[in-house]
Image (spheres, rainbow, N blue to C red):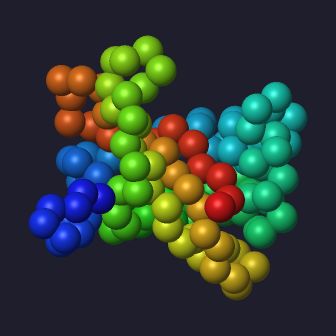
Amino acid sequence: MQLLNDIIIYMQLPHKDNAVIKREKLTKYLLNLLHPVGGAKAKFFRRIGFSNTNVEIFEQELYRIGKNDHVADQKSSEDSSGINYIIIGSIFAPNGNLYSIETIWYIKIGTQNPSFITAYPV
């Protein structure tokens, strides 16, 4: 989001139609209760009804956020190889409720393929 002469300009994820979510990122990280970093996130996502048996729905909800919601912030990646785009959106969970989550997408310098990095509740 940029402010230009008191007009707010909302930005969407660049090259959003090329966005990629690796299935392993979901099954082995965000839904894996035993993962040393992703385990805490997995507790949340599993509690609201996502699991390896409905991972396609989880993936669709994440794509929907990446393709439709506005970028809240952008930062250089830790290794300066690209840009991380932070997008906050709502996810429809299998338990029938709506939850706000923050997603992070990465675009490597010189490419046009946003890659999903992570998500967590807001």
Closer to the camera in the image, 64 or 5 = 5
Q: Residue at x 59, y 38 (%)?
A: 25
Q: Is residue 48 above or below residue 56?
A: below
Q: Residue at x 40, y 49 (%)?
A: 73
Q: Is residue 103 above or below residue 69?
A: above
**Residue furthest front as drawn:** 5
- Residue 51 lies, in percent from the top left, at 74, 57
Observer able to see residue 113: yes
Image side of residue 116 versus residue 42, left or right:
left
* Displayed quadrant of residue 108: top left
Q: Residue at x 37, y 66 (%)?
A: 69
Q: Position of residue 59 (x, y in %)?
A: 52, 57
Query: In the displayed image of the protein, which residue is found farthest to the bottom?
Result: 96
Q: Position of residue 11 (x, y in %)?
A: 25, 59
Q: How many marks?
A: 0
Residue extending furthest toward the top: 79
Residue 115 visible somewhere in the drawing: no
Q: Is residue 93 left or right of residue 95?
A: left
Taking depth in this image into account, of 26 and 116 the one nearest to the observer is: 116
Q: Residue at x 19, y 70 (%)?
A: 6
In the picture, which quadrant includes the C terminus? bottom right
Q: Position of residue 8 (x, y in %)?
A: 23, 69
Q: Quadrant of residue 114?
A: top left
Q: Nearer the viewer, residue 11 or 118?
A: 11
Q: Is residue 94 left or right of residue 102?
A: right
Look at the image and tell me in which quarter the N terminus lies.
Answer: bottom left
Q: Is residue 79 above or below residue 57?
A: above
Task: Give the side of residue 63 with respect to residue 53, left or right.
Answer: left
